[in-house]
Amino acid sequence: MAPSTGTVHPVRYLALFGVLVVALYALVFFTGDKSATPKLGIDLQGGTGVTLTARTPDGSAPSQDSLKQAQEIIETRVNGLGVSGSEVVVDGDNLVITVPGDDSAQARSLGQTARLYIRPVTGSIDVATRDANRTATPEAPAAETPATDAPAPEAPADGTQTPQNRPFLAQDPTTPEATPAPETTTPAPTGGAPSDGTDEGDAAAAEIAAARALRQSSDPTVQQQAVANLDCSVADPLRGNDDPTLPLVACSQDGLNIYLLGPSIIDGQEIADASSVFNSQQSRHEISLSFKTTGSNTWAEFTSANIGKQAAFTLDSKVVSAPTIQGATPAGSATSITGSFTAESAKELANTLKYGSLPLSFAASEAETVSATLGLASLQAALIAGAVGLVLVLLYCLVYYRMLGVLTALSLILSGVMVYAIMVLLGRYIGFTLDLAGMAGLIIGIGMTADSFVVFFERIKDEMREGRSFRSAVPRGWARARRTILSGNAVSFIAAAVLYVLAVGQVRGFAFTLGLTTILDVIVVFLVTWPLVSMASRSAFWSKPSVNGLGAVQEVARERKVAAAASAKETRA
């Protein structure tokens, strides 16, 4: 026999649930884009597809192993950003990335090669100064300018700041010495390629070879020519194909500066972990890097020997950040990449660096609209299936539990209200998209929630069969039912978690929504159903057998009581 749970304050539980709902919808309507519509998956609303064409240095076709490896890395990047519903497919010698909605930028960012190198800066000039000096009579400047006279691509910091024990304070803005352009100009290679497959590979190989010869030469004269003619506004043919053992002339990521860089000192493969952080002192988003043992030791030696000089972080042949080294970084310490990052771009770049670079560099096609594979009819069918399931559950509860079924209906409606807000917020902040598999998980969640109600109500009946009133049976029945409810939901959540970890694609969406509805089932039963039933047990109206449907149970209790009394009388006789 379960003991009574003591004094209960159902209004407090209901008020707590109300606060949670209000908080969720405040986030829905007053944060982000303020849209109250959840994101739908590719199978329901269509999406945007980008074809990535591999660009090899020799123009040969990429191996299938390299394409498979690239596919796996991109899929890992997708998973690192959350359940976004993106698809990555190998199509011949290409990769096709499809993302929900009309944002082609996300597909392009997922296909970023992400070859990171750290190179010393031997000279730099801003593009505006270079272009202004084109019309001036050039003097014979040195091929290299001091690294400390060059601006970093990020916004410069106040020079009076106290240096921190890390090498990434932005340097003071200065006017760098311009590197003049020679009289003859060489057209910058473009990223375009012929449509024929063989010609396209040959053209890409020729562009890469020409770019390497011009921009990775050790001859100061050729370096000067590269600086003078590099066009930072067009696609970079060298993207992700620069030789780390040679110098490099590269644009900054914002296209405002040109850098002359030395050979790489650290490869991005030495990165152990990467995460986006917000520097509250500098009020900017940064990317925190931790290196493996070899890279950490190399970085410690380099920073200690090059204090006051610049080091450039290059990503796919562009300079992301070129801060001045303010002090030595001890081996094993974290390092930050600074730049003009937003919270979203910092997170995307950290995720890209964390899971490694692609084995191939790719040229992205124009974005194409992909129609829904299932579409509006399937969405309507899923909604109808959910509605039919909900109605059947409610009818069963009303027939079997009478007016207690009304409490079940109210609990399910409030659960749906909370689920909808969570779907909207997950789509907004982690890119979660609701596809047909996810909707199946939500519909199954309706049955699981109803199952919790059945367990609770049956425990109340058990207590009433022992001769207790409806009012006294409710708290005792709850004390017994909640252990069963928690055990059942724990098993369901573990199954959903295992499925989410082991599965890929849309199955992960199903597991995610199944686990989410399992958690919400516990919240609704504890904060809504139990308090409502407790309040009903104290009401004279709800305690009527004709209302709560428990008359037959009370009759059984009376019969048992009469039988027990008769048995006791016979025993005494």
Image (cartoon, rainbow, N blue to C red):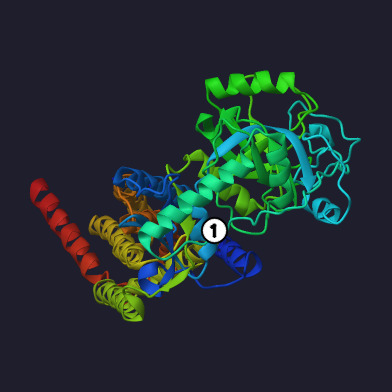
Q: Which residue is mark 1?
A: 191
Mark 1 Cα shell of 10 Å, populated few (<14), some (14-19), many (≥20):
some
Residue 461, x across and y down, in percent = 26, 60
Left or right of 339 on screen, residue 202: left
Left or right of 334 on screen, residue 420: left
| Residue positioned most to the front | 184
Residue at 28% over, 57% down: 455
Residue 239, x across and y down, in percent = 55, 48
> Which of 117/237 is in front?
237
For residue 537, which quarter of the picture?
bottom left
> Which of 308/139 is in front?
139
Above or below, 72 relative to 87? above
Left or right of 424 on screen, residue 345: right
Three-letter amino acid code at the position of disc 1: Gly
Residue at 64% over, 38% down: 248
Residue 374, x across and y down, in percent = 31, 74
Q: For mark 1, give the secondary structure.
A: loop
> Which of 67/527 is in front?
67
Residue 6, x across and y down, in percent = 46, 49
For residue 399, which quarter of the picture?
bottom left
